[in-house]
Amino acid sequence: MAFMRYDYRALPHWGATVEEFRAWLAQFDADGDGRISREELREALRSLDLWFAWWKAREALRDADANRNGLVDPDEMGRLYAFARRNLDLKMADLLQEG
């Protein structure tokens, strides 16, 4: 039995820049420090109705957090964007409409 969900709002491919991704993600930066925690990332993924958002946030943080401080710093945002494109198959036009 597969645990895939095919009806989530952000599907296929091309479209946005890292800056647009950063702008979308900024609305989930609860403490306004310009960095994204695992909890903030989980909320962002939940807003897209993704299954297992907590697990995907953990995996994304592991991949993007180059300095291992537990946060995605502004200079690591490109790594997070690459992870999202590669593993979550996000379509930025959908993200921007959601926000």
Image: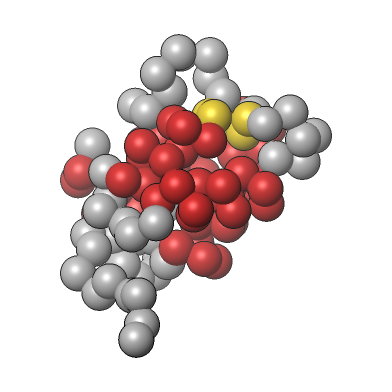
Residue 27 point in image, percent of width and height: 34, 26
As drawn, 51 above or below 25: below
Residue at the bottom extreme, as displayed:
1
In this picture the colour scheme is secondary structure
Quadrant in the picture for residue 43: top left
**Is residue 75 visible from the viewing direction of this image?**
yes
Residue lying at 50% horizontally and 47% vertically, measured from the top left: 57
Classify 74 as above or below 16.
Answer: above
Task: Tell me if residue 15 can be seen.
Answer: no
Q: Please, which residue is most extreme toward the front here?
A: 1
Q: What residue is shown at x 27% (from left), y 51% (from top)? A: 48
Which of the two residues, 69 or 84, is positioned nearer the viewer here?
69
Whether 53 is drawn above or below 8: the answer is above
* Point 56% across, 24% down: residue: 35
- What is the quadrant of residue 6 in the picture? bottom left
Q: Quadrant of the C terminus?
A: top left
| Side of 87 relative to 28 (left or right) | right
User: Which corner quadrant holds the N terminus?
Assistant: bottom left
Q: Nearer the viewer, residue 45 or 1?
A: 1
Residue at 46 percent of width and 32 percent of height: 39
The x, y position of residue 77, in whole percent, is 59, 39
Q: Is residue 54 above or below residue 7?
A: above
Place of residue 11 in the rendered image (x, y in percent of width and height, measured from the top left): 31, 67
Locate residue 3, reporting x and y percent: 35, 75
**91 to the left or right of 57:** left
The number of callouts visible is 0
